[in-house]
Structure formats: structure tokens, C-alpha cells
Image (cartoon, grey):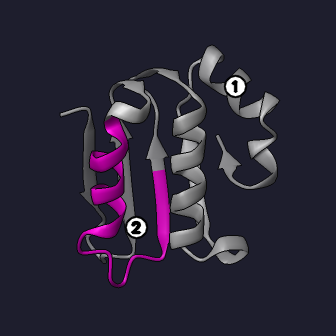
């Protein structure tokens, strides 16, 4: 499966790692990763160290996560992006909505 989750020991941070292509084919797995057993999660980390591609549906999925996590008050960090993924996020002005490292 191209989407994996890890929970911190204190249960407040959930990391969602995406492998390969982040596109509509990962929609349900990504949604399950943030919706299932998420009570008490306050911080979200999207690990894109193994993500080689994302498209507009992935951008939409990130926005759905942001809404789910509290909108403007959400604590979401997107990290370990390769150059192409970072460029797409920058062109889309996602650094205005997410912390990107």
C-alpha cells in the first residue's frame, strides 16, 4: 500500500507517509489514514520522502486533510519533498496553508 501511518507515543502526532504517486488512486487510503482513529491527534506530518509525483487531486486531498484537522488552526507539516513535488506545492501557493520543510 502506498500510504503508511505512524502515531507518536503520546498520540498527538500522526505521520502519513506516501510512496510513489500521490494521485486519485490513493484517495481512499489517504482519507482512511487521517480519519481512522484520529481522536486526540493534534499535529499532522505528511512525509513525502518516497513521493515521486503528485497531481491536482493530491492537492485537493491535502486541502481536505486541512479542513478535517481544523482549517486555519490546523497543525500540518509537509516534509521531505523532492524538487518536483516542492515546485508543484510552491506554484500552488501551498506554503501559505501548510508548513513545508
The residue sitting at the left extreme is: 1
Picture mark count:
2
The residue sitting at the bottom extreme is: 40
Q: Is residue 48 above or below residue 12?
A: above
Q: Position of residue 16 (x, y in %)?
A: 36, 49
Q: Position of residue 27 (x, y in %)?
A: 36, 44
Dot 1: element: helix
- Front-most of residues 50 and 63: 63
Residue ID at (82%, 51%): 96
Horizontal placement of 76 versus 1: left or right? right
Whether residue 21 is in magenta: the answer is no
- Provide the residue designation for mark 2: 13
Whether residue 44 is in magenta: the answer is yes
- Front-most of residues 13 and 16: 16
Horizontal placement of 80 versus 73: left or right? left
- Front-most of residues 19 and 58: 58
- Mark 2 surroundings: few (<14), some (14-19) or many (≥20) residues within 10 A: some
Residue ID at (48%, 76%): 42
Range of the magenta residues? Answer: 26-45
- Mark 1 surroundings: few (<14), some (14-19) or many (≥20) residues within 10 A: some
Q: Are marks 1 and 2 in contact (CB under 8 Å)?
A: no
The label shown at residue 88 is 1
Horizontal placement of 68 versus 38: left or right? right
Q: Quadrant of residue 12?
A: bottom left
State which tag comes first along the sequence, 1 or 2: 2
Horizontal placement of 17 versus 85: left or right? left
Where, quadrant-wise, is the C terminus in this rendering? top right
Dot 2: element: strand
Q: Position of residue 48 (x, y in %)?
A: 46, 33
The Cα atoms of the two marked residues, 1 and 2, are separated by 25 Å
Residue ID at (51%, 71%): 68
Residue ID at (60%, 32%): 56
Amino acid at each position: 500500500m502506498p500510504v503508511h501511518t505512524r502515531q507518536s507515543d503520546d498520540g498527538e502526532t500522526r505521520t502519513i507517509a506516501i510512496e510513489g504517486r500521490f494521485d486519485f488512486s490513493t484517495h481512499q487510503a489517504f482519507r482512511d489514514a487521517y480519519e481512522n482513529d484520529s481522536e486526540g491527534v493534534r499535529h499532522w506530518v505528511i512525509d513525502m520522502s518516497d513521493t515521486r509525483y503528485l497531481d491536482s487531486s493530491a492537492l485537493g486531498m491535502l486541502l481536505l486533510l486541512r479542513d478535517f484537522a481544523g482549517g486555519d488552526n490546523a497543525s500540518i507539516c509537509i516534509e521531505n519533498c523532492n524538487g518536483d513535488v516542492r515546485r508543484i506545492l510552491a506554484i500552488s501557493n501551498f506554503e501559505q496553508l501548510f508548513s513545508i520543510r
